[in-house]
Amino acid sequence: MPIPTTPVGVQRSLLRDDVYTRLRDAIVDGTLAPGEQLRDGDLAEWLGVSRTPVREALQRLARAGLVHTTPGRSTTVATLDRRDIRNAQAVVAAMHRLAVEEAVGQLTAADLDAMRESNDRFADAVRRGDVDAALAADDDFHGIPVAAAANTAIETVLDQFTPVLRRLERLRFASLTGRSSVALHARLVDLCESGDTEAAARVSQETWETLQPVLDSLPPDDDPTPTTEDTP
């Protein structure tokens, strides 16, 4: 898809992070399609910024595996790569397990209520087939124990690798059937509330391993045919 022509506003106080977030989200939601060439000037004009924060954002996106950059030549949106996605899935699952291990005992009653409310929104979005709302609720749900763990290393790793998985989900899910994840979410909250750290951590990892079937069914990298599976 060509870069949109309508400028979008970017908060000047957080210019660098805002540019990165805008470009990351445009890749994740498919606005910037796999294989599309990205030109600094076009992106800067679209975002209404100079080229410098765009170039910095593209460097971060390259480290995350969302774009491919050839020095002195071109930058393109990365295609879906089996190995990259599998690696990201393994890392994200492990980080969420560690976050829950550190969060149990730190979660307040308000935190647990917020997790249940997020899961209710997730379940409702799944029933309606609203992928965007389901993924937003899923992010909110898992973000609560991550915040409670207060481990900046975990947050940094998740910020880098989670978009790789979200991109796969958005591009491949023709419909959203996450009923098993709804049940796993509910189980996770109950285990956190009871203080069973080991079991809660195991269930947290399991929620992300529900992606394994879609990873196993990925077609060859040059044939991104959509499939349908659960989301964590």
Image (cartoon, helix red, strand yellow):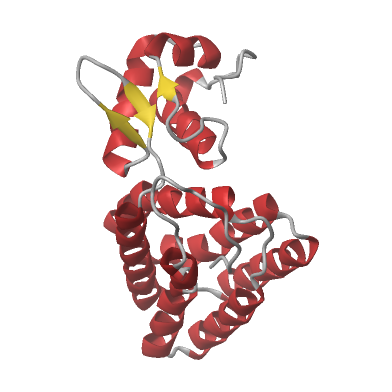
Q: Nearer the viewer, residue 95 or 210?
A: 210
Is any atom of residue 57 visible in this view? no
Percent across and percent down for residue 218 are 45, 60
Residue under the point 53% across and 22% down? 11
Give the image location of residue 50, x and y in percent: 41, 9
Horizontal side, residue 213 vs residue 102: left or right: right
Q: Nearer the viewer, residue 197 or 165?
A: 165
Q: Residue furthest left?
A: 71
Q: Is residue 40 above or below residue 123?
A: above
Residue at the location (32% across, 72% down)? Answer: 98
Note whether residue 68 is visible. Answer: yes
Query: For residue 209, what is the image quadrant?
Result: bottom left
- Number of callouts in the render? 0
Q: Nearer the viewer, residue 89 or 17?
A: 89
* Closer to the camera in the image, 49 or 170: 170
- Residue at the image position 23 percent from the left and 24 percent from the top: 70
Where, quadrant-wise, is the N terminus in this rendering?
Answer: top right
Give the vertical position of 101 relative to 76 (above or below): below
Picture coordinates of residue 32, whole percent (x, y): 51, 30
Could you tell me residue 170's position as x and y percent? 57, 49
Q: Quadrant of residue 6?
A: top right
- Identify the residue shown where x is 79% and y is 61%: 128
In the picture provided, is 23 more to the left or to the right than 153? right
